[in-house]
Each structure stands twice: as C-alpha cells, then as structure tokens.
Image (cartoon, rainbow, N blue to C red):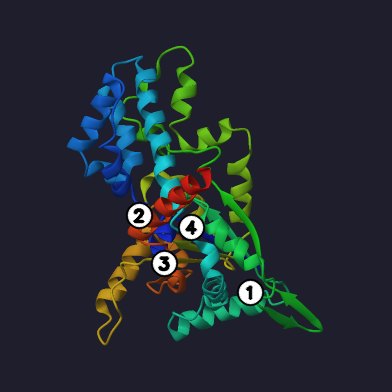
Amino acid sequence: MNITFLIGNGFDINLGLSTTYSNFINYYKTLDCSTEILKKFRSHIRDNEELWKNAEIALGKYTSDFDEGKGMDFSKCHQNFCENLVEYLREEQKRFAYQKHGDKIIDTFVSLNQLTAPFPTEEKNILASLYKKFQNEAITFNFICFNYTSTLDACLSTVKSKPSALGQHKYGNSILNHSIGKISHVHGTLDKDMIFAVNDETQIAKPEIFNFEDGDIDKNFLIKQKANISYLENTDTLTNQILQNSTIIYIYGMSLGETDKLWWERINNWLRASTDRHLIIYDFNMPPKGVYSLPYQKAERKKKNEILAYSSFDKSTKTLLYQRIHITGENIFKGIAGIAEPVEKHIDTIEATIDEEKRKAV
C-alpha cells in the first residue's frame, strides 16, 4: 500500500527554520540594488509587504507594473528574487544539523505507522479497515516535496540508514517490511530546476508584457506546470504518477492556496476515482477538542470544504468524498519540532569555523 505525503514549508518551519516568504522579504528588501528596475521592485515590496507574504501571487500581480512587451525587465526581477531566495534558504538550511539528531529523527518517522491514532473511534475504524484490506501489501511511504530545501531528504536518508525503523507486519507466512519509497521535489531544489511561479495564466495580471520575441519562454517560466515541462525532466508526470498510485494521501505543512491549484484539483479527482482512497490533512490551526468540541467540528468542516472547493463536483459527489477526508491538528512530526540550531548558535559556529580556517592558514 502506498501512502504519500505532500510536504510543504510547514515542515521546515516545524524544524525551527525561518523559511516563510515574510522571513525572506525582511532580508531581501534590505539588499543593495544594482539597477533602477530592481530598485523599483524592492520599493514595491517594501510598500506591499502584506501582499508579498504570498510571494507567488504577488509576483503574478506585479506584472501589471510593466508596459506591454517589457517582460524582459520583469524577468530580471523574477531572476533576482529567485537567486537571492536560494542563498537565503541555503543559510537557513545549514541550521539543521541533522547528523546530531539521528535517533530523534528515526523515532519521529516511526510514527508514520500510527496515522490513525489521532482520530475518533469511527474514523479510526474506517482507516483500520482500509489497512486490513491491503494487508497483503507492504507499506511504502512516498513523499512529494514542495520545498526547495533538502531537510526532508536528510531526514529520509537518516531513516533509510536503519532499514528496520519503519517496522513490518505479517501476512500469512510472509513478513512485509515497511519502507521509504520515492521522493519528488516537484518545484525543484536549491541546486537544480527551481520553480517559483503561479498556477496558471489567470494569475498573471498582465500577460501582454510577454509580447516580444521569445517572450513565451519568459511567460512559461512564470507558470508552474509549464516551467516544469520546460526543464525536460518529466518531473510533473512522474510526480503525478506517485500521487495516482497512492491509497492514502497526507497533506502536511501546506496551505491550500491558489498557486498550487493544479494539485488540489488532481487530489479531488484522485479521491473520486476509488472508494478505497482516503485523504488526511494536517492543520496546525485546528482548535483543541477539549470538553466542548463545537469549534473543532466547525474548523474540520471548513477545511474539508476548502479542498473540495477546488473541484467542480455536484453536491452529492462532494458529500460522498467528504466521508473520506480526515482532518487532524495532531502534529505527526512533533518529535523533531524546533531541533534546528538557534540563529545565534549558528552564527557562532560559522565564526568559529572561519577562525579555525584562519589559524590553519598562519
């Protein structure tokens, strides 16, 4: 049975890294500018910081500041933003000293075998019956990562170093070992094929700025799926195959935003295609259940409706799918929460390394 996790920036934030767009904007707006185009761009960001908390949507809207045919100037802003984002995230990523936390990482990922634990009895029984139906198959955990960082890769590599970590179950006379399967960075990494873009052309405020020779290339680079295709790595197709072969999909650390609309539409269609498919969504904003669970139940309904809103299904179909969507506020990766080095300690480590290099050079 394939269980696939869609992993968003909430994973890095959970580790203790400052990887939100707001964190980056605070850094980016202070950088020196070499051209008038970039000065204007930084000024726009400083004047619209609330908008740039969702930087991909903001980027699409920023096209309205350019005249028709001036898309090359826009692309210079796009490129500069991406290049500096990479450098910023590389520094943040260094704060995750995963080698020091191997046991904690492994113990945390063992909890992937307890996906049903947070749910009330009826939901738990529904999911348990699903596991039972596929008990003749080993459990494989796949990951579709929407982050540019390699923090998830480092965790998975640590887990793979102990093959028995994810456990096993018995079926007849066979012992079936659970394992880590595939990982796909659907938007690229800090080293290769980075995609920072909108979902589709409707999110580009002024597409006519790309009315110039080869402007189609610039415009396609601003649309996620087309940018993915342009890299010729078949990433989008291969990633979608991972999704389509899944029995359970678990969304972690992602807002259900418009810039990833393609994936929410795919998940709705995936869910409808088989009654054996279930979707789990982690929402860290879920209120506590406590003794009065009305706020929790309302938040649960709101989140289910939020994902279903990306479909064009009729009401009766949505009602059926509703039963196979499960919402949890229980952080399955809480065991590695906050394990990144504090900024101050990270700076001390860098300075100590520089001092050591200087000493060796003498």
Most extreme residue toward the left is 47
Q: Position of residue 228 (x, y in %)?
A: 54, 36
Is residue 175 something that shows in the picture? yes
Separation of residues labelled 1 and 4 (CA atoms): 19 Å
The disc placed on residue 282 is 3
Q: Which of these two is toward me, 79 or 248?
A: 79
Residue that mark 2 sits on: 18
Q: Nearer the viewer, mark 3 or mark 1?
A: 1
Residue that mark 4 sits on: 7
Q: Amino acid at mark 2?
A: Ser
Disc 4 crowd, CA 10 A, few/some/many (<14, 14-19, 20+): many
Q: Is residue 191 above or below residue 112?
A: above
Instruction: Give the number of marks.
Output: 4
Q: Amino acid at mark 3?
A: Tyr
Q: Nearer the viewer, mark 2 or mark 1?
A: 2
The disc placed on residue 6 is none
Q: Nearer the viewer, mark 2 or mark 4?
A: 2
Name the image quarter holding the N terminus: bottom right
Residue beneath the point at 35% across and 31% down: 204
